[in-house]
Image (tube, rainbow, N blue to C red):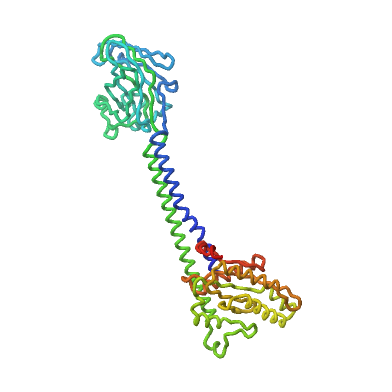
Amino acid sequence: MSASSSETSFQPLVRLLGYAHYFFGGLLIITAALLGWQHYGMERVIDLTGDQFPVFIEDDRNSGGASVGSIERRGEDLIVHCHISRKIEWPYCKLGFSLLKGATGLDMSRFDYMTIEGRYAGPGTSRFALVLAQAEEGLTRLDQWQTYKINQIDALDLPPDGGELMVPLKWFGVAQWWKDMAKPALEHSAVNVDNVARTEVVISGGAKEGNHVFTLHRMRLHGKLVTLDALLSGLVTTWVLCAVGWLAILTLSLRSQLRYSRTAVALLRTVNKALELEARDLAGQAHIDPLTGVLNRQGLRAALMSTSSLLADPMTVIFIDIDHFKSINDTHGHDAGDEVLRQFAKVIASGIRSSDRLVRWGGEEFLIVCPMTNVYQGRILAENLRHALHRETWPVGLHVTASFGVAQHHERDEVGVVIKQADAELYRAKQGGRDRVCAYITADMSAYAETV
């Protein structure tokens, strides 16, 4: 397995990490947009005076009084006629809206405020009270009104110009008279409006006897489709999940890079072993391949150790393999194969510089070390050599071609790494159909492109 193929195992993770700033930038924009929409829009409005909720009228005759109330609908307006009689201390008429659907009321905890538009005519004042009757689990029995928790606001006045009155729901408090009567447990003593069974407008006219007319144009609940708390909770959860996911990807990337580094070290050791001959094999062995007259592996080792300029960056390695050489030996014999190898080495040697080193790596494989040459220049040299092979006349009328793999050495790497990279590119050229050049080029080599 080559170093380049090991590297591809974590390249998708690296690319994904590269997109992280785009992803989190987009998430930041979405967060700001949602918060802005929640603040300035995302409105949810329910009109209580429409026809979706039944209305009713009550007066103080149920409590021993003598006041009489009636209601009529005129267009969209609800008109309450209330004849106040001071038979009891707190006379009233009450306009109510039934919010129950089956045994379930309206959840007003998701709303922020109410708006009321209306006008008053009569001998008293336009002062009125608002009641939210809560059906609370563990407290309320639907057939007993005393068990409904009474959340109330007293002493509200309609605007004199007939404008809109805004009533925040946080103004409501549990009525003290109801606490004195019902004596609820502590957990039922606080305001709760998540299951409101009915809403009531209590009209007293300042307790002035006579006919009072309260015209209600509209009464609405206003809130958000998504509450700020719910939105913030969702956004925080999203950010946490994305951050955890990013950290998980980063961890996987680092682990993949560590595995790649270990693979590269193992490959380096393999190449070093390939370049090192046992002491008993070195005795009497020359640095020149006897068949082709070019350097052998030991000759390359000696050249690298004695000539530091060979490793001067940029340095490029070209790995060459004669295409279908085995079939030449099988068809025409080993003598013809040897003649092809000698002529091949001669053609390659005549096409390179005096500073380059040509090595017979083994069998039909050759290696060229090109100092002061980047990968782009090495690829051009390889293409020139490939074309030179096409122009050559070969023994017994053969047509000899070769595949080339090109890779550039970096000062941070050992020589064995670039040899393995060139070998991997040679393999890619052979897999691609042979008689071609493949080069190992990464993004950080783009600076060399201008010199080619």
Q: Quadrant of residue 342?
A: bottom right
Residue furthest to the front: 451
- Residue 313 vertical position relative to residue 152 in the rendered view, above or below: below
Nearest the eye: 201 or 255 = 255
User: Which residue is at a point 26% across and 27% down the rendered structure image?
Assistant: 179
x%, y% of residue 360? 61, 79
x%, y% of residue 88? 25, 13
User: Which residue is at a point 37% across and 17% down the rendered structure image?
Assistant: 216
x%, y% of residue 98? 39, 22
Residue furthest to the bottom: 284
Q: Is residue 66 visible in the rendered structure shown here?
A: no
Q: Quadrant of residue 348?
A: bottom right
- Residue 72 vertical position relative to residue 330 in the rendered view, above or below: above
- Residue 270 vertical position relative to residue 98 in the rendered view, above or below: below
Nearest the eye: 238 or 373 = 373
x%, y% of residue 13? 49, 58
Nearest the eye: 336 or 132 = 336
Nearest the eye: 40 or 48 = 40
Residue furthest to the right: 397
- Quarter holding the N terminus is bottom right
Q: Quadrant of residue 29?
A: top left
Residue 338 placement, left or right of 83: right
- Quarter holding the C terminus is bottom right
